[in-house]
Amino acid sequence: MAKNKMKSHRGACKRFKVTGSGKVKRNKAYKSHILTKKAQKRKRGLRKATTLTSADLKRIKSSMGM
């Protein structure tokens, strides 16, 4: 008999994207509100997406069903 399949975490699938080389992209935090006290340079840096660290990679990929 076949075992049940694990469901992917739909919230994680919406927040993270997997690149062609297998890295996981994410958006940076602290860009949603209270932006007046943050410097323009800091807000510019928060626009760009970044990759996950190796510490989180295994956990996030498993929750995405990979």
Image (cartoon, rainbow, N blue to C red):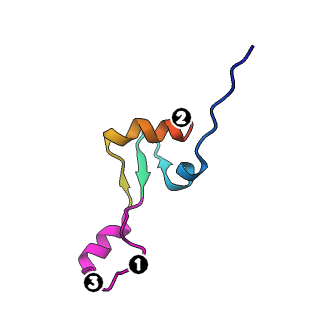
Residue located 48% across and 38% down the image: 61
Residue located 43% across and 38% down the image: 59
Q: Magenta stretch: give its range.
A: 27-48
User: Which label sits on residue 33?
Assistant: 1
Instruction: Give whichever of discs 2 and 3 has the lower sequence position.
Output: 3
Residue located 43% across and 46% down the image: 24
Q: Which residue is mark 3?
A: 37
Give percent across and percent down for residue 19: 46, 46
Q: Find out whether the residues at labels 3 and 1 contact each other: C-beta distance under 8 Å.
A: no
Q: Mark 1, residues whose alpha carbon is within 10 Å: few (<14), some, or many (≥20)?
A: few
Q: Which residue is mark 2?
A: 66
Is 8 situated left or right of 60 in this image? right
Q: Residue furthest bottom?
A: 36
Q: Is residue 49 magenta?
A: no
Q: Is residue 30 magenta?
A: yes
Q: Is residue 23 above or below residue 14?
A: above
